[in-house]
Amino acid sequence: MSDEIDSGLNVDNSYAEQLTGFYTPSQGDRAPAATLIAFNQPLANSLGLDTDNLSEPQLAAMLSGGTDIKGAAPLAQVYAGHQFGIFSPQLGDGRSILLAEVLDNGGQRRDIHLKGSGRTAYSRAGDGKASIGPILREYILCEAMQQLNVPTTRALSVVSTGEKIKRHKPLAGAVLARVASSHIRVGTFEYFADRGQTDKVKLLADYAIKRHFPQLICGSEAEHHCYLRLLSEVCKSQAALVSKWMNLGFVHGVMNTDNMTICGETIDYGPCAFIDSYNPTALFSSIDSQGRYRFNNQPPAALWNLARLGETLLPLIGTGAAQAVEQAFSVSNSFDGKYRQQWLDRMRRKLAIYNEEPEDLTLALTLMNSFQLNYQKFWLDGMRGKLGLSNAEAEDKKLADDLLELMAAQKVDYTGLFRALAKVVAGIPGPAVDLFTHPNAFEQWLARWADRLERDPQTPATRAAAMNAVNPIYIPRNHLVEQAIKAAEDHADYGPFEKLQRVLSQPFIEREGLEQYASAAADTSTRYTTYCGT
């Protein structure tokens, strides 16, 4: 048994106490030489972590998993998942543990979760470890997303373990401590639904409602409507999340159902990347050979995952006519036909299990269909903000779509162009125009945009400021992330990582001397490829 540390955290083990059978108690490995590499002091303060009375060695020991937090019940969660469309009936935390569940200083329930802390009951053939490169990538990306106002897991710390991890070559071992509203996934529901354990699906749904959607007051008279509302809330939160990804040019890379949380936060930054030159079919992940999770397929991929969640809730919300399935998933040609057909076929098979046909399933599927309607609204609202529009007109979507088409045709830097549009508003069109190799078509678009701005009530100064508040100048440029990782891996040099973190902490504020952080890589001839890596 490891030593306990009095962390000052307000530990409250609701998952461990209320969801027996959903996890296996688990202890992280004791690191040979735990050393704190990165530590998020503001996040630690918000959690109530008593850093005034804890030494760095104590923090490193605790946040690498080998030393218990007083009062905590560390565990590895079990879940299933569709991975690139193929169902795996048991996955689970194979290289991570839920170190502690706490109530933060605002009374919000948070998970402190370790990644790379060692083997668990769900590790299968893996060693449960992680190397420094992917751990630093996740720290950089999730904290950048936080500053970009995207719902996300947070990074609390990176600990170097002092051991070598066997991968393609020996690599320095590391553990990430991340913080989330919870780690309940679509795959968690799938695990119990696949086993026919409807009682546990209900228990999990009730827990999720109480933890994340307490506004859904569930009365006994119409209990099934509560699970419909749960599905509706999850669909809406995911629509909001994915729309933010798309507005920023972010590609998650591995949108499996075990990587989609019920709480609507971005999780598991593995083969993720940001687009430099705009390409609607951008694909970076080395393991996504079919392009299932390419940039423009992220909305339908999210809906596919939500359909899997809807399947697990069917026994709780009733069944309905098969034609309701047709209604639910035939709304838009923008969703890839083959995926829509997969949804239809799967739901028909699910419907065949049941005999009753109340109207509730029609409502359930309509709610899932609302994902697309919500997504289109959220995305267009985001694009209006990026274009400096404070009011709405019917042709706004076409205006945005036409700009994206021009950018794709000429491989224009996505982040750079939207940032430069605020200069156009200020009467300085050059930086935007110069991004186009053949600017005539863009200049015609600028004329249309100027005409549209005449019908918007904002002053130019107010508009430019509003645009700069939503169009970042600094994002985790792929080449800069790689430079930071390489310096750490090859030379244990964390200077580039720390500098990049400082720049990304204020992504919307232009600062002198940081021009290299605002530009894409000079050489874009080679396709950028990312790897899961941990």
Image (cartoon, rainbow, N blue to C red):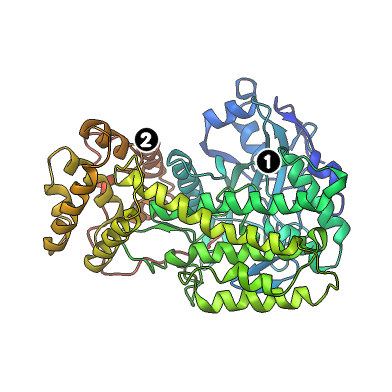
Position of residue 109 measured from the top left corner of the image (x, y, whole percent):
69, 35
Q: Quadrant of residue 18?
A: top right
Q: Is residue 18 left or right of residue 258?
A: right
* Residue that label 2 marks: 506
Q: Eyeballing the image, is 48 above or below 514?
A: above
Q: Nearer the viewer, residue 265 or 329?
A: 329
Instruction: Please state the horizontal and vertical placement of residue 187, each as a whole percent of the image.
Output: 70, 61
**Residue that label 1 marks:** 111
435 over 283 or under it: above or below: above
Give above or below for 203 relative to 146. Answer: below
Asked whether residue 493 appears in the rendered view, the answer is yes
Q: Nearer the viewer, residue 423 or 333?
A: 333
Query: Left or right: 65 with respect to 2?
Result: left
In this rendered view, identify the residue nearer to me: 402 or 189.
Answer: 402
Residue at 53%, 29% in the rendered image: 41
Query: Is 44 left, or right, of 186 in this rendering?
Result: left
Quarter of the image holding residue 274? bottom left
Instruction: Looking at the picture, tell me which residue is in the foreground, 246 or 145.
Output: 246
**Residue drawn at x 65%, y 65% as measured from the top left:** 307
SS state under label 1: strand
Q: Residue furthest top?
A: 52
CB contact under 8 Å: marks 2 and 1: no
**Residue type for callout 1:** Asp
Mark 1: few/some/many CA within 10 Å (<14, 14-19, 20+): many
100 left or right of 424? right
Q: Residues within 10 Å of mark 2 (few under 14, many from 20)?
A: some
Give me the disc on residue 531.
none
Residue drawn at 47 percent across, 72 percent down: 333
Q: Earlier in the sequence, mark 2 or mark 1?
A: 1
Report how far apart the C-alphas of labels 2 and 1 lie in the structure: 26 Å
